[in-house]
Image (cartoon, rainbow, N blue to C red):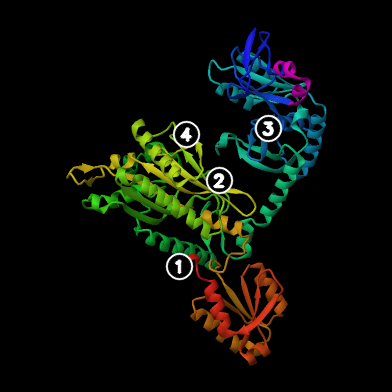
Amino acid sequence: MIHIRLPDGATRALDPASTAADLAASISPSLAKRTVAAVVDGKVSDLSAPLPDGAAVELMSRDDPRALELIRHDLAHVLAEAVQALWPGTKTAIGPAIEHGFYYDFERDTPFTPEDLPVIEKKMRQIIATKTPFTCEEWSREEARQHFEAAGEPYKLALLDAIPEGEAVKIYRQGDWLDLCRGPHMRSTGDAGSAFKLTRVAGAYWRGDSNNQMLSRIYGVAFADKAALDAHMTMMAEAEKRDHRRLGREMNLFHFEEVAPGSVFWHPKGWRLFQTLIGYMRDRQEEAGYVEVNSPDIMDRALWETSGHWQNYRQNMFLAKTEDDRDYALKPMNCPGHMLIYGQGTKSYRDLPLKIAEFGKVHRYEPSGALHGLLRVRSFTQDDAHIYCTPEQLTEECLKVNDLVLSIYRDFGFEDVRIKLSTRPENRIGSDESWDRSEDALRRALDQAGHPYTIFEGEGAFYGPKLEYVLRDAIGRDWQCGTLQVDFNLPERFGTTYVAPSGDKLVPVMLHRALFGSLERFTGILIEHHAGHLPLWLAPVQAVVATVTGAADDWANEVAGALKAAGLKIETDLRNEKIGYKVREHALQKIPVQIALGGREAEERTVTIRRHGTDKTQTVSLDEAVQALVAEAQPPGGRR
């Protein structure tokens, strides 16, 4: 007999080679009917896998949140079977579960089109309706190789070669169709359910390498039930309406060109919005004791070797070799330049904490397929800062950064903020002792702040652990923005010191800190969060003064002049067009306030105000309008 431990602490004796399905059946028929997978010693497992003696086993139902990844993985297999049934000869690559759903990559002479999706989806539902069992088989490498060679599946052969020696080769079969897969899966195709939808097709290079074959990728979304799927599809429809790329065109903010992939061409209105963000952040940083600097965009290889970027980050850097045979790199981060600025002159403990900030343009190589408007670019501006402090000041400075970043997000309308603590990755510099101190400092700061957080093992930067601040927007999407990293390593590598009270030269602790993160990305998030309806203080054009008749032109110019003199961002529209046409055009550009002036307003020296998104108007004196709009246009906290 083998003995299994249950979550309530009880033990159960079973025959040798019993499975989790046998365990569920031994407890009750209703439990066996509900159970789709098991958690064995903390790892999700098939119901059909034999249980080891002494294992801790938890039985999982389909409505368990952990089963959602299984649902999505099962659907990826169903998708691949459906495609090969409809188009025999299609080659399969990989098909993982991802956030909100799944995808599968295929090689086909004719790429898939959106018109193919309803046909594939119908076939998938037919496969699900058969409730064909998933079965796991272990094959020898040679047996698997012979099968996939005969089937003409080169990508499966490449995946087979990537399986480490000594690891089992698993084949998951659903009827006559099979796939190379680590698993696990649920009981049958029927467990995948009907709450899914194929959403789009895209190109994707094999293994993400542009030197490899371009494959055709089919994406789908999937949830445990129809209500969750419907909610997600509603959110997706709303997200499409809020897409910053479309709104950027309509509002005339920016565009992109193939001559500079992943780099933004800012138009006057967009650049004004961008500078408003910088001005806001500059004020907040000055209040918090930061000093602003600027460092070169391109620096010699030797600097990046000292910092460790050349060894650990070179694949993400833009490199250049000059006529005098020197290697340079466009900076992917500002920190090495700040190390050189700190190193000018002797620093005392009385000078610490020293907070150096820069709105630095950085350049990082991203695969072309990953680029996405302002949200994923190759060239961007960071509101970057580095805090040099003593070990005794470390926790207090982490707390100050935490309070500052949460305050800033509230000013922009983000109240729901999650914090991730990412710990040491496998590829890192520095001793385990320095990593222990860094991670402990961040934990202590969060614990003292009383803010909940989630630990993500192994996701820190190569030089230090980090906090990641994740914002939830108006339609429930999460965006990772600000970061805070503790670094004992870079100051040591650069020989950076300060003079302690004892007279000894000690190495300071360095905090890497970004609050917006990428200003380009934060701008895109803001546009989508507000659906383009930016609050008055952020709007690149706060009001447009439009005439109903040419007789009001002089009054319109006087009104616009008074508003501009008060510091407001104003445009005028004196075109010989109907006012309804003008209203619709400026509404499309999401201008918060429209001021319409006709003969009556010119005669009475009044203005008629219409707010974006409403048909209601209000007629007031010019002085009242100026006073009200100036008050509304103040940034949060009255900062200018």
Instruction: Check if mark 1's residue and mark 2's residue have beta carbons within 8 Å.
Output: no
Kindly indicate the quadrant of the structure image that contains residue 241. Answer: bottom right
Q: Residues within 10 Å of mark 1 (few under 14, many from 20)?
A: few
Residue closest to the eye, 395 or 301: 395
Q: Tell me: residue 596, above or below residue 428.
A: below
Q: Residue at x 60, y 76 (%)?
A: 544
Residue at mark 1 = 639
* SS under mark 4: loop
Discs 1/4, front: 1
The numbered dot on residue 368 is 2
Q: Earlier in the sequence, mark 1 or mark 4?
A: 4
Tell me if residue 634 is in the magenta stretch.
Answer: no
The numbered dot on residue 64 is 3
Q: Residue at x 53, y 53 (%)?
A: 521
Q: Earlier in the sequence, mark 1 or mark 3?
A: 3
The numbered dot on residue 458 is 4
Q: CA distance from mark 4 to mark 2?
A: 26 Å
Discs 4/2, front: 4
* SS under mark 1: loop
Instruction: Check if mark 3's residue and mark 2's residue have beta carbons within 8 Å.
Output: no
Magenta segment boundaries in residue numbering: 22-34
Main structural element of the magenta stretch: helix, strand or loop?
helix
Q: Residues within 10 Å of mark 4 (few under 14, many from 20)?
A: some
Q: CA distance from mark 3 to mark 2?
A: 37 Å
Q: CA distance from mark 1 to mark 2?
A: 39 Å
Q: Earlier in the sequence, mark 3 or mark 2?
A: 3
608 vs 424, left or right, is right
